[in-house]
Image: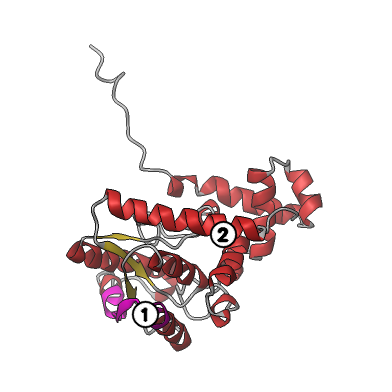
Amino acid sequence: MKGLELPKESLVKVENAITDAIMRVVEISNSSGAVIALSGGIDSALVATLASRAVDVYALLLPDRASTLPEDMKHAEVLADGLGIDYEVIEIEDIVQSVYNKRPMLGPDDCRLAYANAKPRVRMIMNYFAANLDGRIVLGTGNKTELLMGYFTKYGDGGVDILPIGDLYKTRVRQMARHVGVPENIIRKPPSAGLWAGQTDEAEMGATYGEIDAVLYGVFDLGMSLDEVEKAAGVSDATVRMIMERVRSTEHKRSMPAIVMLDQALQP
């Protein structure tokens, strides 16, 4: 989609805006720095790289034996070492398994998604535990594509203090990652939330990031109709409508919980 990729001068402005925002949140909250969960993927690598230029960053590597690839942890460790970020590795499989063990009447096929979503929620707990210990904020790693698609776990990886790349489509995340020097072996990996073995973002969402970004950018940034987006992006009608339905059905993830207003009920 024309206009989706950013020119060089915009990449520099975005880099400065993100680092300034992270620094400002840390200062306003009177925090000592930030905590980030490093997965070995591009999003957390980009956020960690940018944040390390602005504040003191402490990283958590939170693998689980069932679904985390050894190469992902290696990439995360090498990145942290290269950035000069202190980190610790905490295996979370036993914690996640303990949640599953409390419901012994359920088989693996009965609760695959619920079990998978327990992993990012455990990671959120570990992030905030570390943040509370040192008086830090928690950095989120969600990008604009994931947020609009609702492709994150509510109160899991969505439970953070700031989303530094939350206004960057995945296409632009890749651009920014190359711009700031994220290792190419991280950039080129198939994106995965690490929810189960072999899981990938694109397979789960049902379209490539290129297709999704083109549709979202056309609708939300250019104000195009669905028919116009279909023609301009070269994406099928079914894919366009699937993407927009996911945006609609996941609105609750992007909003604070609804408050039941009682004005009328309390009228005499």
Name the residue nearer the viewer: 205 or 45: 45
Residue named by callout 2: 12
The mark total stands at 2
Q: Amino acid at mark 1?
A: Pro
Q: Which element carries disc 2, helix, strand or loop?
A: helix
- Residue 44, given in percent of the width and then of the height, sits at 45, 69
User: Which image quarter: residue 110?
Assistant: bottom left
Badge 2: few (under 14), some or many (20 or more) residues near its Cα, within 10 Å?
some
Q: How is the image coloured?
A: secondary structure
Q: Which residues are magenta?
A: 80-97
Q: Is residue 171 visible?
A: yes
- Residue 2, given in percent of the width and then of the height, sits at 75, 54
Q: Earlier in the sequence, mark 1 or mark 2?
A: 2
Residue named by callout 1: 63
Name the residue nearer the viewer: 248 or 176: 176
Q: CA distance from mark 1 to mark 2?
A: 33 Å
Q: Is residue 42 above or below residue 15?
A: below
